Image: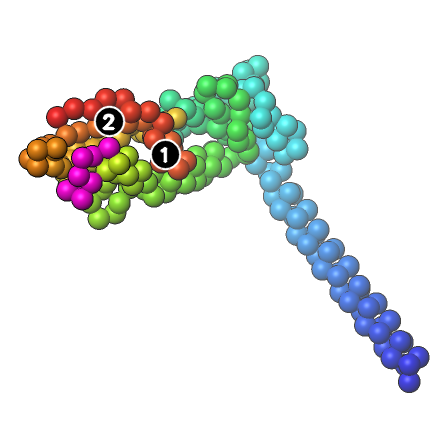
């Protein structure tokens, strides 16, 4: 009985192994098929591996003579340069400050999709910093209340912000009671972190 169970167990393991091998071949075949498809959009036969070599490297200006004249694409900003080179059918995104490629691939849409993803993620990060109901900035509101004579009297009037790429500048106008019990209007402008909304610096404030 024990030997029979052992044989059945061996057959099960062998069967499972065979299935995994078949799946592996199928996946590898699918991958190769996809890679073959990519070759059709590689007119200069650069090769995907060779192209990916430039990721994280300096922008390859020397390649312009045979890759094509760079076309600046939508999504380019003071921080990013989004480019398409038609002769090579290559598009990339570079960090302007570092002059380094942060994304590179074949086809114009590739870079556009990448920068759109970055911009969408950035919008979500910024959106989380503000109250959906009245537009106030969560961290700035905390700082204001902490400095007020009567935090419970705090009334938010308006908050606006400017996206400076590396950080946000946020200005809030608010009302509250002073030491004499009178309601006064004040405003404060600060620099905030893009990632978490924390206050980097108080720029100015007034009434």
188 horizontally vs 124: left or right? left
Relative image position of residue 74 (x, y in whole percent): 37, 30
State which quarter of the image contains the C terminus.
top left
Q: Quadrant of residue 40?
A: top right
Q: Residues within 10 Å of mark 1 (few under 14, many from 20)?
A: some
Instruction: Judge by depth and name the residue closer to the eye, 23 or 42.
Output: 23
The kind of secondary structure element at disc 1 is loop
The kind of secondary structure element at disc 2 is strand
Magenta run includes residue 73: no
The residue indicated by pointer 1 is 198
Residue furthest to the front in view is 180
Sequence-first disc among 2 and 1: 2
Relative image position of residue 141 (x, y in whole percent): 25, 38
Residue furthest to the bottom in view is 1
Residue furthest to the left in view is 182
Q: Which mark is residue 190?
A: none
CB-based contact (under 8 Å), mark 2 and mark 1: no
> Does residue 9 lie above or below 92 as drawn?
below
The residue indicated by pointer 2 is 189
Q: Which residues are magenta?
A: 147-154
Q: Residue at x 14, y 30 (%)?
A: 186
């Amino acid at each position: 009985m024990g030997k029979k169970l052992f044989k059945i167990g061996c057959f099960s393991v062998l069967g499972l192994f065979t299935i995994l091998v078949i799946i592996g071949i199928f996946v590898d075949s699918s991958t190769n098929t996809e890679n073959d498809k990519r070759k059709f959009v590689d007119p200069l036969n650069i090769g995907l591996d060779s192209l990916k070599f430039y990721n994280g490297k300096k922008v390859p200006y020397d390649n312009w003579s045979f890759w094509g004249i760079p076309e600046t694409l939508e999504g380019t900003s003071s921080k990013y340069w989004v480019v398409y080179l038609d002769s090579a059918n290559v598009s990339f995104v570079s960090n302007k400050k570092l002059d380094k490629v942060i994304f590179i691939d074949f086809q114009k849409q590739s870079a556009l999709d990448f920068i759109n993803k970055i911009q969408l993620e950035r919008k979500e990060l910024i959106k989380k910093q503000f109250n959906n109901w009245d537009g106030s900035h969560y961290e700035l509101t905390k700082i204001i209340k902490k400095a007020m004579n009567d935090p419970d009297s705090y009334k938010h009037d308006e908050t606006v912000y400017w996206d400076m790429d590396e950080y946000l500048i946020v200005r809030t106008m608010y009302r509250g009671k002073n030491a004499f019990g009178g309601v006064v209007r004040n405003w404060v402008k600060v620099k905030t972190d893009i990632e978490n909304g924390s206050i980097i610096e108080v720029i100015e404030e007034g009434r």
